[in-house]
Every structure is written in structure tokens, then in C-alpha cells.
Image (cartoon, helix red, strand yellow):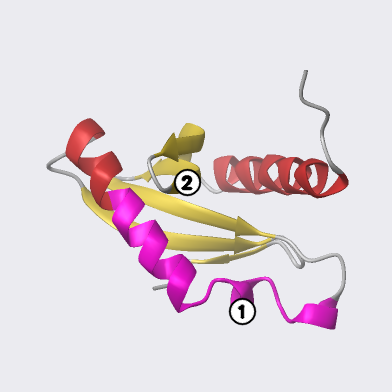
């Protein structure tokens, strides 16, 4: 049996908070922790007609920078690749965008990249 690590528990709680926050803002949560070859999408949501790929980031302290700053070029590239795979299979005609929820202030960054 898989024993949760402190980091995985922190991540799960952050994703719970982000999902609740997005639902309250009118998003529909379609999938959580979508695993695809090469990575995972934290949340796949629907906001109006758009499919939204949401990266959730949390930081216990600011010692290593902000949560938003943790979504660098490499992570963005990975998410773009994962989104293409996801959309081809589940929503080939959908318009998509990338949002980031920074849980260290519960801030939604729409069209983050």
C-alpha cells in the first residue's frame, strides 16, 4: 500500500483547495490528477466553452520563490505536450487555455502561459 509522503499530502490539500476555489468561480472540474505518458495534469476543467488545463502550485514558505514562479519554461512545455495528448483524445475540437492556481495566496492566474 502506498503511504502518502508529507509532500504528496501537501499537494493533495492544495489541489483540494484549488478545486473548491475554481468550483466557486464557476469552473466545472472534469478530471483530477490526469496521468498521461510523460506526466500528470493537476486539474482539467471547463470554463464556459474552454477546456482549462490547471497547474496547482503551493509553497509552504517563500524561501524558494513564489508558487507562480515555480511554473517555469520546462513545466510549461510539459503541460503543453500533455494538453495536446489529452485534447486529442477527450476534446479534439475544444478551445483550451492554461491557468495556474497559486495556493500560497489562493490566486487564479488565467491564461498564465
Distance from Cα at disc 2 to Cα at disc 1: 18 Å
Q: Main secondary structure of the magenta part?
A: helix
Q: State which quadrant residue 46 falls in.
A: top left
Q: Earlier in the sequence, mark 2 or mark 1?
A: 2
What percent of the width, then of the height, locates residue 14? 73, 49
Q: What's the residue at 70%, 39% (across, down)?
A: 16
Question: Badge 2 local density, few (<14 within 10 Å), some, or many (20+)?
Answer: many
Name the residue beneath numbered marker 2: 41
Residue stretch in magenta: 62-83
Q: Is residue 69 left or right of residue 100?
A: right
Query: Total label count?
Result: 2
Q: Which residue position is annotated with label 1?
A: 69
Magenta segment includes 71: yes
Q: At x 29% / y 41%, what residue is drawn?
A: 86
Could you say which is closer to the camera, residue 4 or residue 94? 4
In the shown orientation, is residue 52 left or right of residue 59? left
Using the image, determine if residue 31 lies above or below residue 78: above
Residue at x-position 71% and y-position 78%: 66
Quarter of the image with the N terminus is top right
Query: Which x, y percent locates residue 19?
Result: 61, 42
- Whether label 2 touches label 1, CB < 8 Å: no
Is 28 located above or below residue 57 in the figure? above
Does any portion of residue 50 appear in the rendered image?
yes
Q: x, y percentage for residue 40?
A: 49, 45
Q: Residue furthest top?
A: 1
Q: Residue at x 83, y 79 (%)?
A: 62
What numbered label is drawn on residue 108? none
Amino acid at each position: 500500500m502506498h503511504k502518502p509522503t508529507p509532500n504528496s499530502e501537501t499537494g493533495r490539500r492544495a489541489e483540494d483547495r484549488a478545486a473548491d476555489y475554481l468550483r466557486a468561480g464557476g469552473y466545472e472540474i472534469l478530471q483530477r490528477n490526469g496521468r498521461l505518458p510523460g506526466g500528470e495534469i493537476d486539474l482539467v476543467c471547463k470554463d464556459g466553452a474552454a477546456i482549462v488545463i490547471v497547474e496547482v502550485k503551493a509553497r509552504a514558505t517563500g524561501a524558494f520563490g513564489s508558487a507562480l514562479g515555480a511554473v517555469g519554461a520546462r513545466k510549461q512545455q510539459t503541460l503543453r505536450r500533455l494538453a495536446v495528448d489529452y485534447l486529442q483524445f477527450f476534446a479534439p475540437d475544444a478551445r483550451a487555455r492554461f491557468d495556474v492556481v497559486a495556493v500560497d495566496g489562493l490566486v487564479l492566474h488565467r491564461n498564465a502561459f
